[in-house]
Image: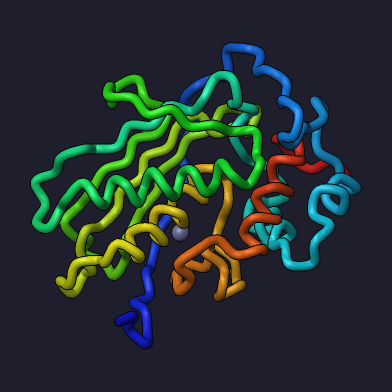
C-alpha cells in the first residue's frame, strides 16, 4: 500500500570551477531533437524557448545571473556515465541502479540533444554517480558540476544517499525521484520555488512534471552563455 505521505527529499547542489575546455566541434542536432543557434543567447530567445507558462526558465536564469549553462549537443557523442555498481553501504542492491538508469532515460526522452552511454571506467566518465550510506546533514543527494569558459557543463558528480539522515532506507520510488532531481542539476537545472516540480529543493514529486520537462527543453533551445541585453 502506498504511504499517504511520501518522504520529502532534500538536496544540495554545488557549482564547480572551470576545469576543462571544449575541444571539439559538437555535431548538429538530429531531426526531432531541439536545435540551438550558434550565437550568444538573447532575451527574445527566452519567449521562443519557453512558450509554456509552467516553465521555470526565468527563475533558473535569475539564479544563474542570466547565464545559460548546459551541456553542448551530445547526441552522436553521448555523455558517458559511470554508476557505482557495488557499494559497501547497507541495503544497497542492483535495483537502485535500475532506478538511476530509468531516471536518465526519462530526461533523454524529453527531446533534449543529449544522450547517455554507460561505461565501466569511472576515470573516463563525464558523469560519475556514487552512493553514500547517509549524509550527516538532512539531505539525500548532492551534485557537483564543472563547466568551461563557454558555460558548457563538462563534468558531473552525483552522490545519492541510500538512507535518510534519520536512518530509514530510501524506497525505490524515492531513489528514482532523487536521481531525477540530481540529474536535472547535472543537465543544468537549478532549484525552483514550484514545490510540485522535481527540481524543488525539497523534493515531493516522484516524477517529472510538465514544468520540469518544458524548462529542460527551453534550456536546451538556448545557446550557452550570458544573455545579451
Ligand atoms: Zn537540488
In the rendered view, would you say 211 is above or below 189? below
Which residue is at the front of the view, 204 or 59? 204
Which residue does the image show at 21% across and 69% down from the upper left?
165
- Occupied quadrant, residue 153: top right
Q: Is residue 225 left or right of residue 133?
A: right
Which residue is at the front of the view, 55 or 15? 55
Which residue does the image show at 65% across and 39% down from the upper left?
112
Question: Which corner quadrant holds the N terminus?
Answer: bottom left
Residue 26 location (% of width, % of height):
65, 18
- Occupied quadrant, residue 37: top right
Residue 226 location (% of width, % of height):
74, 40
The colouring scheme, among rainbow, by chain, secondary structure or one colour, is rainbow
> Outermost residue toward the top?
24
Residue 204 location (% of width, % of height):
45, 74
Which residue does the image show at 55% across and 19% down from the upper left?
77
Which residue is at the front of the view, 150 or 93? 93
Question: Which corner quadrant holds the C terminus?
Answer: top right
Q: Is residue 158 left or right of residue 61?
A: left
Looking at the image, how many numbered discs can be counted on the residues? 0
> Outermost residue toward the bottom?
4
Q: Is residue 46 left or right of residue 176?
A: right
Which residue does the image show at 59% across and 26% down from the upper left?
74
In the rendered view, would you say 34 is above or below 79? below
Residue 18 location (% of width, % of height):
51, 30
Amino acid at each position: 500500500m502506498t504511504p499517504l505521505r511520501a518522504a520529502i527529499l532534500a538536496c544540495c547542489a554545488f557549482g564547480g570551477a572551470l576545469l576543462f575546455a571544449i575541444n571539439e566541434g559538437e555535431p548538429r542536432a538530429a531531426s526531432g531533437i531541439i536545435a540551438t543557434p550558434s550565437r550568444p543567447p538573447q532575451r527574445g530567445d527566452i519567449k521562443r524557448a519557453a512558450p509554456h507558462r509552467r516553465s521555470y526558465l526565468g527563475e533558473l536564469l535569475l539564479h544563474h545571473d542570466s547565464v545559460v549553462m548546459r551541456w553542448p549537443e551530445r547526441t552522436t557523442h553521448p555523455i558517458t556515465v559511470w554508476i557505482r555498481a557495488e557499494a559497501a553501504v547497507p541495503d544497497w542492491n542492483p535495483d537502485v541502479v535500475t532506478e538511476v538508469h530509468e531516471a536518465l532515460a526519462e530526461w533523454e526522452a524529453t527531446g533534449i540533444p543529449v544522450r547517455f552511454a554507460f561505461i565501466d571506467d569511472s576515470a573516463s566518465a563525464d558523469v560519475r554517480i556514487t552512493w553514500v550510506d547517509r549524509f550527516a546533514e538532512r539531505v539525500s543527494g548532492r551534485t557537483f558540476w564543472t563547466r568551461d569558459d563557454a558555460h558548457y557543463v563538462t563534468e558531473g558528480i552525483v552522490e545519492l544517499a541510500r538512507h535518510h539522515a534519520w536512518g530509514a532506507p530510501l524506497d525505490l520510488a524515492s531513489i528514482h525521484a532523487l536521481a531525477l532531481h540530481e540529474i536535472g542539476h547535472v543537465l543544468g537545472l537549478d532549484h525552483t520555488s514550484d514545490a510540485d516540480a522535481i527540481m524543488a529543493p525539497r523534493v515531493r514529486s516522484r516524477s517529472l512534471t510538465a514544468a520540469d520537462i518544458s524548462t529542460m527543453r527551453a534550456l536546451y533551445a538556448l545557446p550557452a552563455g550570458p544573455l545579451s541585453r
